[in-house]
Amino acid sequence: MVHSRRTFIKTATVAGAATLFDVGRLSAASFVRPDVATVKKHDLDAYSKAIKAMQALPNTNPLSWAYQAAIHGTTLSGSQPGWNTCQHGTPYFWSWHRMYLYWFERIVRKMSGDKKFALPYWNYESPSERQLPAPFRDMASPLYTANRGAGWNTGAASLSASAVDTSGFMPLVPYFNAQSGCEGTPHAAVHVSIGGWMGSVPTAAQDPIFYLHHANIDRLWNLWLKQGGMRSDPINDAAWRTTKFLFFDENGAQVWMTGCDILRAEDQLNYTYENEGAQVNQYCLKPLPWWIYEVKLWPVRFPPIKLPPGPDPAPYEIDLGQQRDQLLSAVRNATTQVTLDLSGVEADKQPNIFWEIYLGLPKGAAAAPNSPQFVGTMALFGHGIHDAHQHGGFKPAAFSFPINRAVQAALTREKGNALSLRFVPRGAVVTNQRTVVRSEATLTIGSAQLATRQLKAQ
Ligand code: C2O
């Protein structure tokens, strides 16, 4: 039986009958954030120089390295304006981090004395860029920190293909779904894979690689939007548009920003990314036609799951019951997005690994992310962990994985009403090290449901 509930989510696009968006000018911006692999060493010297200068300032100076990192999160006691304000698991994940990087980059530009400085991005989706970029491994450089997981500073560690996979969130159309998908993979999976300071919110922004990781997450926002097909920033959401966040400019003066200030990176913030092409421009103030998503929720029989510490837990089963055939026709419909939503996800401490998730993997089949049964990864960062001092208090994590492909492959192949659900612990890929990947914590998943989103113009 399909329990159905209709939710109407209005998503805005700019006015205009034929075109949904303005497409921006090509590279009129003054600053082009480069792929770190194409950056010559002397360009990273400007970043190094700024880090050194920032580290020499007292913690109470907004231009200091410690203060800037503390805006994201800190274990320092005391409180200064703007500290501990990063946004995870909220509507502001992409927008807050865009604002944060923008002011950080201006401060680095000033502190380095290099007026042309633009923050590089770490393009780890490219298989040749899965190791920590070499200049960050040089012990003599300010780009280095010993606070990283095993193998990262020797070059032995690299990111797994599943940790940097963007195919999970890119197809998602509603903004908040896509944002939360990207916050999970690659964002959280990369944090957890690197570990050390990067593995926890209150310390992450002390590692100089943090800002290159986030430049890439910011670039992925642009690339997601650029796919079109009814994708839009949430400019019809009043809270998203108007909530103000505090930062500091390069002179140490307070600045407040809202979502409307950062919609158009090139037009409003004067930067683009190398190789990104023209950006999509959206405007808060234009009249908005509405799009509608019809959301149907499909409850599934799913006991709360506990993934014990250790390697490879046994597979679980999702019982589809009478919904099997309806689900199969839903996943076959090209305009319907079907997701597996896991909520109430929590652990007592950082598991220090992430899980690859496979739906409908046949018994005995190898769990490889190039399998059609791979649906994404689950990593905890910023919420869902009880012992991390999270500002704003504890909140369980939630994940949503697109499953059209996996369900179609499994139900076409098998006759039954059950889908196996398998969680495979993974970490960084470390060469010459044959260790079993183990979770260090028990993970609880409170509930699961399947959801379908049908997109239609009103
Ligand atoms: Cu606010 Cu990648 O973290």
Image (cartoon, grey):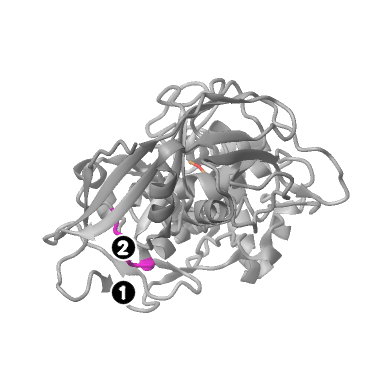
Do labels 1 and 2 touch, CB within 8 Å? yes
- Give the distance between the C-alpha atoms of the residues marked 1 and 2, in whole angstroms: 9 Å
**Magenta span includes 229:** yes
| First along the sequence among labels 1 and 2 | 1
Residue 131 placement (x, y as % from top left): 72, 56
Which region is colored magenta?
226-233
Residue 86 seen in render: no
Quadrant for the N terminus, please: top left
Packing grade of label 1 (10 A; few <14, some 14-19, many >=20) is some
Indicate left or right for 31 with 196 as reference.
left
Question: What residue did someone put label 2 on?
Answer: 264
**Element under label 1?**
loop
Majority secondary structure of the magenta segment?
Answer: loop
Residue 429 placement (x, y as % from top left): 75, 49
Q: Does ligand 1 reach within 8 Å of label 2's beta carbon?
A: no
> Where 280 sits versus 327, above or below?
below
Residue 250 placement (x, y as % from top left): 41, 51
Residue 220 seen in render: yes
Quadrant for the C terminus, please: bottom left
Q: Residue at 66% x, 56% y: name it.
A: 161
**Magenta span includes 357:** no
Indicate left or right for 7 with 395 as reference.
left
Q: Residue at 67% x, 62% y: name it.
A: 129
Indicate left or right for 89 with 351 as reference.
left
Q: Amino acid at mark 1?
A: Gly
Q: Which mark is residue 24?
A: 1
In depth, the one of 317 and 102 nearer the eye is 317
Q: Amino acid at mark 2?
A: Arg
* Quadrant of the image occupied by residue 16: bottom left
Q: Residue at 37% x, 31% y: name it.
A: 81
> Where 357 sits versus 85, above or below?
below
